[in-house]
Image: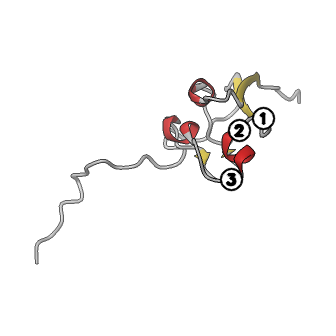
Amino acid sequence: MKSQDKSVSAMADPAVGEAGKTGDWRDLKPVIDYGKCIPAVKNRPACYLCWLYCPEGVVKAGIRVEIDLTYCKGCGVCAEECPSKAISMVREEKGHE
């Protein structure tokens, strides 16, 4: 039986939030308008370009698309790739302590 070399990997998926938690430095965050989101409107799996192109892997594909803001860096790729313009980038509100 051959031992497998675990140091070599082909086409590995990035772990969710591979770059770590966002913290408080993000300026913009994605907001989904579910009235425009293709999977939500058609009530079936479709589209998911936001999920496909997210460099952090924080978009959860389902009938209701979700974005994990704990790890989202606010790059805006999801909003740029959304064909129905259901995702908009809005200014992050900073809490005053």
Among the two numbered marks 2 and 3 on one chain, the one whose residue lies closer to the N terminus: 2
From the image, tell me which residue sits under label 3. 63
The answer to the question of whether label 2 and label 3 lie on touching residues, with beta carbons closer than 8 A, is no
Q: Which amino acid type is marked by label 3?
A: Ile
Is the Cβ of the residue at disc 2 closer than 8 Å to that at disc 1? yes
Q: Position of residue 33 (x, y in %)?
A: 78, 35
Please tell me how crowded label 3 is: few (under 14), some (14-19), or many (20+) other residues with Cα within 10 Å. Answer: some
The crowding category of the residue bearing disc 2, from other C-alpha atoms within 10 Å (few below 14, some 14 to 19, many at least 20), is many
Q: Which label number is shown at residue 33? A: 1
Question: x, y (%) of residue 86?
Answer: 71, 31
Question: How far apart are the alpha carbons under marks 1 and 3?
Answer: 13 Å
SS class of the residue under badge 2?
loop
Mark 2 — residue? 37
Residue 83 drawn at (x, y percent): 61, 29
Instruction: Measuring from the top left, give residue 24's x and y in whole percent.
Output: 71, 30
Residue at horizontal 61%, vertical 52%? 45
Mark 1: which secondary structure? loop
Residue type at mark 2 is Cys
Image quadrant assignment for residue 97: top right
Count up the numbered dots: 3
User: Marks 2 and 3, Cα distance to the nearest angstrom?
Assistant: 9 Å
Say if mark 1 contacts mark 3, CB within 8 Å: no
